[in-house]
Image (cartoon, rainbow, N blue to C red):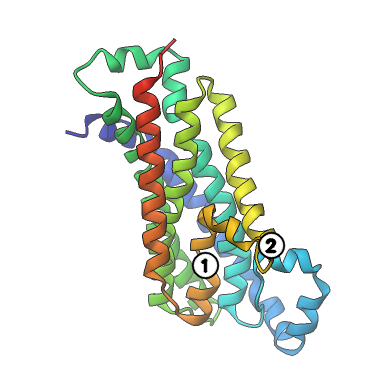
Amino acid sequence: MLELARYDGRHRLTGSLYLSVAMSLLAVVVIWIYPSFSGSFEDVDEEFLQAYPEGVIQMFDIRTMAVLEGFLAFELYIFGWTIMLGLYLAYLAAGTIAGDVEHGRMDILLSMPVSRARTVAEKFASLAVPIVVVNAVVPVVVYVAAALVDESVSAADLLALHAFAVPYLFACAGIGLVASVVVDRTSVAQRLALGVTFGLFMLESLLAGTDYEAVGAIAPMRYFDPNAILLESSYDLVDAGVLVAMTLVLLAASQWWFRRRDIA
């Protein structure tokens, strides 16, 4: 069982370790520069935030820079996790099916005694490797780096944040998976996945607090809030459930579409 998932997962392991190193370095840099600014933030945090355009404050949900948790939420988790990793997982997922179709490998896979639905599911499951690895390595780095600069971060909040990041990243990957079964060419599927994922981020950010806020409910970003977890120790299990449901819907839609399409 899960032969395809294990095969693809093994081939994703090296890239996942490189990804973890890159995100760990980003975390270290963010934490390392924080003490240089923390004294200024404590005195003029409100004035500092007012210097940002209102659109930037709303888009990145900047709440405070006066504490390390607020600095991390903005500099590392909203930018690094919500945007960068969300886009990366959508991009990665967009090549799962489309890449095999484009290069002729899908015909070989489908000649084996494995259904199309299972093929899609196992290809998608292999994305658990980068998602789990990066969310297992980085919180340890963040916690240790914070201690080295004489700052503290709640270990429970940090672990909760990375636990909630897992269903969020799977939901973003689900967007890429849909693009991967709809489009045959890998490059087109990847551009489509990037465009849709970033468009949903912009949609949720710009419509928040407006009469059209309800439209943003289709965006995974609505259900992943680093600020609430790090600053308020607020863990919304309903939001996590919505992300899981969203992922399952996207996976089911991808399987349904792939079963009914022709492989050129």
- For label 2, the crowd category at 10 Å Cα-Cα, with few meaning under 14, some 14 to 19 and many 20 or more, is some
Counting from the top left corner in percent of width and height, residue 228 is at 51, 75
Q: Earlier in the sequence, mark 2 or mark 1?
A: 2
Amino acid identity at mark 2: Met
Residue at figure coordinates x 78%, y 69% from the top left = 54
Residue 8, percent across and down?
A: 33, 32
Residue under label 2: 59
Query: Residue 35: which quarter of the image?
Result: bottom right
Q: Residue furthest front?
A: 211
Image height check: is 20 above or below 118?
below
182 on left or right of 192: left
Answer yes or no: is residue 8 visible.
yes
In the displayed structure, would residue 144 be above or below residue 92? Answer: below
Left/right placement of residue 219 relative to residue 39 reads left
Q: Secondary structure at mark 1?
A: loop
Q: Going by the picture, which residue comes out furthest to the top?
A: 264
The kind of residue tagged 1 is Asp
Label number found at residue 225: 1
